[in-house]
Amino acid sequence: FQYRLKFDVVINPETDEPEVEFLVPLSEGGVEFMEYKLEQLVDVFLEYEDGDGAEKDSMPQSEWEAAWQLYSAYITAFHSALKAAETTELSDAVWRAGNRWYVHEMADFEFDDGEDDDDGN
């Protein structure tokens, strides 16, 4: 299962809600990946959220809390990105971009025309 997905999540200071900016064109594969990962994240969260098992006892409380903060951030990011994907045009352009699909700015997004650049790439 291969995907090409890159996005930023920022908190809107006026609404205090997360907002997503896709940094490369969003593809159907990217949406499917996020749906799959969000389901996995939620399943694990539901299994361990009460923290009364051996896992919690095997690490310091601060590490346990930090791990769940990170986990919560991933859930928020994928949930917010999927919400944004509902109003984002899906495209296979990221798959036509060759090895430079990961560029940061959408404005700089270039398609691989199969020819080498001046630097030989």
Image (tube, helix red, strand yellow):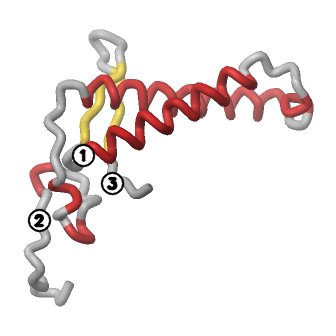
Question: In the image, residue 114 lies at what x, y percent?
Answer: 12, 79
The disc at residue 4 is 3
Residue nearer the viewer, 77 or 113: 113
- Tell me the element at label 1: loop
Left or right of 65 on screen, residue 43: left
| Number of numbered labels in the structure image | 3
- Tell me the element at label 3: loop
Task: Determine whether label 3 and label 1 are within 8 Å by CB.
Answer: yes
Q: Residue shown at 31%/16% (left/top)?
A: 13
Residue nearer the viewer, 56 or 83: 83
Instruction: Look at mark 2 in the image and give the residue it sits on.
Output: 111
Give the distance between the C-alpha atoms of the residues marked 2 and 1, in whole angstroms. 15 Å
**Residue at far top of view:** 15
Question: Quick check: 5 above or below 88?
Answer: below
Give the distance between the C-alpha atoms of the residues marked 3 and 2, in whole angstroms. 14 Å
Question: In the image, residue 7 lies at what x, y percent?
Answer: 32, 42
- The disc, 3 or 2, on the residue closer to the chain's N-terminal end is 3
Q: Neighbour class for label 2 at 10 Å: few (<14), some, many (≥20)? A: some
- The disc, 2 or 1, on the residue closer to the chain's N-terminal end is 1
Q: Amino acid at mark 2?
A: Phe
- The disc, 3 or 1, on the residue closer to the chain's N-terminal end is 3
Instruction: Look at mark 1 in the image and give the residue it sits on.
Output: 27
Task: Determine whether label 2 and label 1 are within 8 Å by CB.
Answer: no
